[in-house]
Amino acid sequence: MELIFLGTSAGVPTRHRNMTSILLNLQQPTLSQMWLFDCGEGTQHQFLKTSHHPGKLDKIFITHLHGDHLFGLPGLLCSRSMQGNPSPLTIFGPKGIKEFVEMALRLSGSWTDYPLTVKEISAGEVFDDGLFKVTAYPLNHPVECFGYRIEQHDKPGPLDAQRLLADGIKAGPLFQQLKKGQTVEMPDGRRVNGQDYLGPSTPGVKLAIFGDTAPCPAALAMAKEVDVMVHETTLEHEMAEKANSRGHSSSIQTAELARDANVGKLIITHVSSRYDWEGCQRLLAECRSVFEPCELAEDFSVFPLA
């Protein structure tokens, strides 16, 4: 699994930073899809500068309906259709996302040739396919805004085939059921619980991707003990009051949340266009003064997760 940042600017683009968009490449043995978090203006152009293709997008999660997180969506949807990709796509987002998508397609005389589902969400679990669970948390912004906590279900431990053989259970199709932790009945009438023959499970990856927000009570629960937390750092510490008044967070506030939530790594993004490279390094230094395992996302930064 890996995170690819397609856009890292707040509000408006800069010469070096596009509008907010984050790609989650699942890279699972049985799952090659990608998920997109927000779709700011120019996102499809950013895709062209990577080795990834929008046709592999399976889900898009929109945090809120401000333009810098949304205006790239109609173009991406239409281009994906023109490229002839038939695979379904599901969009999750706050109330109004369905109207936005339908209106943009209708007024522009556009359509999609693939199954498109738009789901308006509220706080709570929004998706669980047995491999990953996604939960939405309400944030503090002038419009309804969510953050998404993504949790990979724990991977079952290895099957102890040698112990099964020692217990008189022959190798065969039943091993597949036992590997899944199921209970099977043997020809001699014995009932064998696969859980008794599995090694320790491997913890799944936990990830928190925040939308725009000032500090809020839900943030701590959302980020608690995740492996990676992605959070906006719109302004520096001395501008915290201004940031909060507009529904944003400062560098120190973001780092304090990462520290208090006991996260593994903090990745900061959504940087105000007022900051050049040196200014961005100052934001990073302020975060690291509170929480050292912190990285600054640039456009096209790639962060492995597992």
Image (cartoon, grey):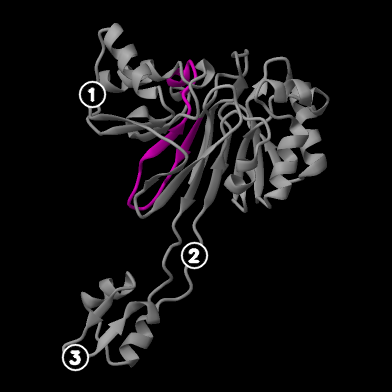
Q: Position of residue 177 (x, y in %)?
A: 26, 72
Q: Is residue 179 above or below residue 247?
A: below
Give the quarter of the image for residue 106. top left
Residue pointed to by mark 1: 84
Give the quarter of the image for residue 93. top left
Closest to the observer, 256 or 163: 256
Marks 2 and 1: CB-CB under 8 Å?
no
Depth check, mark 1 against mark 3: the one in front is 3
Q: Which residues are magenta?
A: 22-46
> Which of the marked residues, 2 or 1, is nearer the chain's N terminus?
1
Depth check, mark 2 against mark 1: the one in front is 2
Mark 3 and mark 2: Cα distance apart in space: 32 Å
Q: Position of residue 236 (x, y in %)?
A: 78, 26
Residue pointed to by mark 3: 189
Give the numbered dot on residue 202: 2
Q: Position of residue 279 (x, y in %)?
A: 78, 22
Residue in view at x 73 percent, y 48 percent:
259
